[in-house]
Image: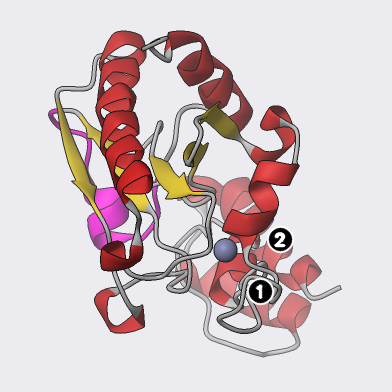
Amino acid sequence: MSAEPEESVVQQGRDEGASATGSERTPRYEEERGGAGTPDNFQRLWTPHRMAYIKGEGRPTGAGEDDGCPFCEIPRMPDEEGLVVSRGTSVFTVLNLYPYNSGHLMVVPYRHVADYGDLDEAEYLELATFTQRALTALRKCSGAQGFNVGMNLGLVAGAGIAAHLHQHVVPRWGGDTNFMPVVGHTKVLPQLLRDTRQMLADAWPAS
Ligand SMILES: [Zn+2]
């Protein structure tokens, strides 16, 4: 229901085009809108899916592994459904649902652990190995020219899911940022996640 008036705004701007003047547009606009708001010449790019992120859908309800932690649930799903790229003995890799760039993945221990210092030797060794393999796979299938690699430990450090640590691997290319994220706070991603997952799974090094 609430989307209808907004769609009419976009429609009106498209229909009237450059020939319309502000004085012609305003009365008709306000008639349609019931006078709410002030008309302008901007088009709107609606991204309702972002609301799920803003409202925290899928976020754990607490710090425990039984509080809906997605990193504990994902390994129980089939690869395609969970967007799992590869599975090791102690860690797995999964695509980020809210990627900074196409191919943004995370290396995650199976064990629900918050602090890097709490990883045991097998876990941190395989986390490092899988980070290396992620770089190899991303270079191979997408020609990444650089990477941002790292962890946000703790909510104050920016961790979305602080209770279960995860290492981000974000591929970078020259010119991969533009006015959209800087001014518009909107990332434009050229590839669907399931296609990215398949491509990376195919490119994942055997050892
Ligand atoms: Zn967890």
Could you say which quadrant of the image residue 36 lies in? bottom right
Q: Which mark is residue 4?
A: none
**Local SS, label 1:** helix
Position of residue 156 in the picture relative to residue 197 (left or right): left
The residue wearing badge 2 is 7
Question: Where is 153 relative to 106, above or below?
Answer: below
Q: Position of residue 88 (x, y in %)?
A: 49, 30
* Nearer the observer, 98 or 117: 117
Q: Is residue 157 left or right of residue 67?
A: left
Q: Please, what is the dominant secondary structure of the magenta stretch?
A: loop
The residue drawn where x is 54% and y is 74% is: 54
Asked if the stretch drawn in magenta spans residue 177, the answer is yes
- Judging depth in this view, the residue of 65 and 53 nearest the camera is 65
Q: Nearer the viewer, residue 170 or 34?
A: 170
Which residue reaches farthest front?
Answer: 121
Counting from the top left corner in percent of width and height, residue 11 is at 67, 53
**Quadrant of the picture in which ligand 1 is shown:** bottom right
Q: Where is mark 1, residue-wise?
A: 29
x and y percent of residue 152 in the render? 28, 65
Question: Could you tell me how far apart the alpha carbons at marks 1 and 2 are, in whole angstroms?
Answer: 12 Å
Q: Nearer the viewer, mark 1 or mark 2?
A: 2
Residue numbers of the magenta segment: 174-187
- Amino acid type at circle 2 is Glu
Query: In the image, residue 31 lies at what x, y percent?
Result: 75, 81
Residue, x 46% and y 19% (percent of image)? 200
